[in-house]
């Protein structure tokens, strides 16, 4: 499932290719992909047609396009936008910009025709093989802290109601490491379980949790209440470093299910230090002249990867 770096790559593509344009036509090819839109496919299309895209915004793994109706200015002295096209990418959802002449993808679910701009494709297509994702036009509400809803080109203090409970992510300027440490200490759970809780910190999934914990030399089951402030700071630094590197590489692709808006795959998978490397030597241990092996262990109906030396299990219940 796409995590923060992958969704941010898509957001940047939408900011370049879609923001500022008007939706001239909205075709729902498969109604299952707009099931989150309570009033149905016809209302979904009706709310989009004629709407202008003001911004592409991301908070954690959540992504939305802020919309202004035909009579809205979207300016501080005019009618503020009150809706957004929210995208749930799920396991295989893709937002791709295409020229009208390009053949339709096999798993095309929704097609938006955009106002013409010379040299730019006119269609935004939502493609989803497994149909776990979807689109919906949703209301915007003020953020709880008065800050921008998320990462955008000109972010407003608005967020989709469906994402209002989502915590800020580690790359958000308003992310508070000290408050994060306090919340971690109060959770009384394993550190990886806490990192996957989007109400605590957003944008982190299985892959980047393993990578960040490897970077911070922390075992995934480390009790959160035992974390020292310096260890939390080391973890936050590791999360940010991993995600920044992943962004530079265009995200992580293991197959064709994740691509950016131009259909290109990311290549950060080549730089992963823990995830997917079971049975291989730990790169850090090799560099330090020590012996450590990456192992794969069951975790919450999936897997966790760690180094046997860098991220040891506790001894006698103590860390």
Image (cartoon, rainbow, N blue to C red):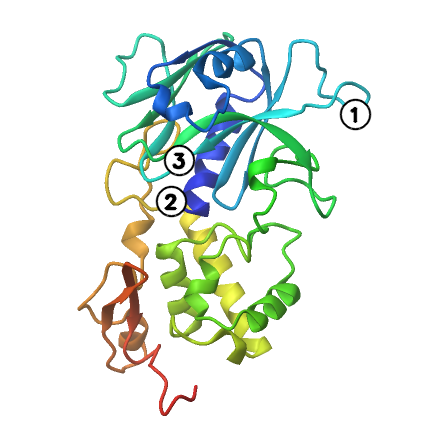
**Is the C-beta separation of discs 2 and 1 under 8 Å?**
no
Q: Where residue 228 sits in the image (x, y, percent)?
A: 56, 79
Q: Nearer the viewer, mark 2 or mark 1?
A: 1
**Is the C-beta separation of discs 1 and 3 under 8 Å?**
no
Determine crowd level at label 2: few under 14, some 14-19, many 20+ residues with C-alpha closer than 10 A: many
**Is 226 or 165 nearer to us in this picture?**
165
The residue indicated by pointer 1 is 76
Is residue 10 something one can see in this rendering? yes
Q: Which residue appears farthest toward the left when viewing the image?
A: 279
Q: CA distance from mark 1 to mark 3?
A: 31 Å
The residue indicated by pointer 3 is 89
The residue indicated by pointer 2 is 251
Residue 232 sits in quarter: bottom right
Counting residues from the N terminus, which is met first, the one under dot 2 or under dot 3?
Answer: 3
In the picture, the quarter occupied by the N terminus is top left
**Is 65 or 120 nearer to us in this picture?**
65
Q: CA distance from mark 2 to mark 1?
A: 35 Å
Q: At 29% across and 66% down in the image, what residue appears? A: 305
247 left or right of 296? right
Q: Nearer the viewer, mark 2 or mark 3?
A: 3
**Is the C-beta separation of discs 2 and 3 under 8 Å?**
no
Counting residues from the N terminus, which is met first, the one under dot 1 or under dot 3?
Answer: 1
Number of marks in the image?
3
Query: SS class of the residue under badge 1?
Result: loop
**Is 161 or 260 nearer to us in this picture?**
161
Q: Where residue 94 sits in the image (x, y, percent)?
A: 36, 30
In the picture, the quarter occupied by the C terminus is bottom left
């Amino acid at each position: 499932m796409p995590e923060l770096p992958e969704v941010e790559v898509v957001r940047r593509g939408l900011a370049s290719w879609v923001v500022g344009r008007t939706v001239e036509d909205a075709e729902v090819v498969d109604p299952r992909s707009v099931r989150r839109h309570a009033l149905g496919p016809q209302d979904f299309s009706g709310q989009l047609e004629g709407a202008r895209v003001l911004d592409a915004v991301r908070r954690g793994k959540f992504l939305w396009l802020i919309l202004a109706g035909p009579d809205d200015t979207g300016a501080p002295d005019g009618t503020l936008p009150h809706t957004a096209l929210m995208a749930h990418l799920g396991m295989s959802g893709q937002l791709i910009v295409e020229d009208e002449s390009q053949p339709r993808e096999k798993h095309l679910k929704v097609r938006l025709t955009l106002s013409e701009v010379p040299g730019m494709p006119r269609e935004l297509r939502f493609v989803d093989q497994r149909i776990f994702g979807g689109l919906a036009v949703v209301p915007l509400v003020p953020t709880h802290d008065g800050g921008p809803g998320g990462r955008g080109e000109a972010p407003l203090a608005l967020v989709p109601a469906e994402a209002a409970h989502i915590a800020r992510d580690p790359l958000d300027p308003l992310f508070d490491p000290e408050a994060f440490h306090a919340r971690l200490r109060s959770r009384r759970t394993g550190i990886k379980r806490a990192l996957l809780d989007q109400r605590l910190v957003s944008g982190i999934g299985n892959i980047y949790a393993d990578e960040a914990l490897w970077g911070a030399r922390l075992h995934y089951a480390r009790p959160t209440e035992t974390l020292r402030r310096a260890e939390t700071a080391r973890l936050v630094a590791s999360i940010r470093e991993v995600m920044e590197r992943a962004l530079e590489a265009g995200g992580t692709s293991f197959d064709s299910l994740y691509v950016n808006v131009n259909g290109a795959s990311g290549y950060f998978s080549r730089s992963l230090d823990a995830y997917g490397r079971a049975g291989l030597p730990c790169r850090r241990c090799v560099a330090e002249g020590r012996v450590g092996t990456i192992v794969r262990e069951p975790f919450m109906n999936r897997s966790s990867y760690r180094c046997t030396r860098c991220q040891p299990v506790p001894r006698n219940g103590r860390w």
